[in-house]
Image: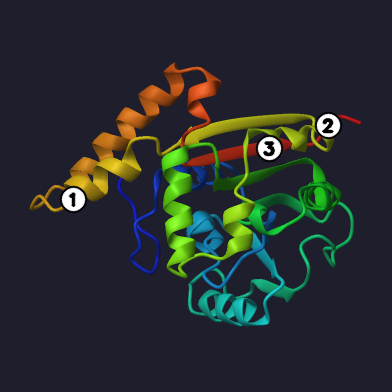
Amino acid sequence: MPWEFSAEGHALSAPYLFCRNWFQRKALHGRDVLDFGCGARSLSIDILAGTGAGLTGVDISPESIRMASERARQTPGFEQSRFDVSDCEALPYEDDSFDYVLSLGTLSCVHLDRAYAEMRRVLREDGAVFIVDTLGHNPLFNLNRRLKLMCGLKMAWTVDHVRKIGDFELAGRYFGDVQMHFFDLLTPFLVPALSTLPGSSQRLRRWSWAADSFLLRSVPLGLRKHALKTACILTRSAK
């Protein structure tokens, strides 16, 4: 897996690289993509760079929308992007408005039934929803979240609403196909522990990604669910 960075110089982790590569293989020129809960950084800009896709971002925070809009204006290819302040559970768009919906770390902040229903409503018949989010099964990751909550580094709502396998399976009520991919089982432990070795950070991260990829393809779902991240691809039913 290639080592890549966002436009701001941040390393893109394995699930985001998987998402980026998935979109880069599509014919996106002139297609409409909705960044569902875009946040201030609007990571969809990194995902869609160079594709020619039309980007619309939506978030309930006016400040996040202001910052995302500013970033888009300063990024070649995204100057005409649109960003709207709105509740993701009641999107201000017509039915069948987007070819793709992209949700990057938003599901812990929304009511799932309403969010899935809105994603499906605005998605065109041959489109897809791509979700990257955190899983809440691993007790070590959960302990880390609780410690960060105690230190004021996380909000109680997001810690209490980290999603689990059943939350993604719920999408089957609204979509014809639900595909899940799993990432970051060893990487969150190995890279911080060994990255102090001179000149080893990129090499260790690539090695740990490869090890994670092998393990998470080989073990049963009961173990895969202990990964830190999932990428979930939803497509509409034929109805």
**Of the two numbered discs 2 and 3 in the rendering, the one whose residue sits closer to the viewer:** 3
The amino acid type of the residue labelled 2 equals: Ser
SS of the residue at dot 3?
helix
Residue in the image at 25% along x and 41% along y = 190
Quadrant where the image shows the C terminus: top right
Which residue is identified by label 2? 237
Mark 2 vs mark 1: in front: 1
Disc 2/disc 1 C-alpha distance (Å): 45 Å
Mark 1 lies on residue: 195
Return the disc, 3 or 1, that comes first in the chain's sequence.
Answer: 3
Asked if 202 appears above or below 165 in the picture, the reply is below
Q: Residue at x 76, y 36 (%)?
A: 170
Q: How far across and down, in percent of the image, does residue 176 sit?
A: 79, 30
How far from the left and from the top, in percent, is residue 194?
A: 17, 46
* Residue 155 in view, yes or no: yes
Is residue 48 or residue 191 the one in the foreground? 191
Q: Which residue is mark 3?
A: 168
Residue kind at label 1, given as amino acid type? Ser
Query: Which residue type carries mark 3?
Result: Phe
Image point (33%, 66%), residue name? 9
Label 1, residues with CA under 10 Å away: few <14, some 14-19, many ≥20: some
Q: Residue at the spot x=48%, y=60% of the render?
A: 46
Image quarter in which the N terminus is found: top left
Which residue appears farthest toward the right when viewing the image?
A: 239
Secondary element at image label 2: loop
Task: Indicate left or right for 217 with 59 as reference.
Answer: left
Q: CA distance from mark 2 to mark 3?
A: 16 Å
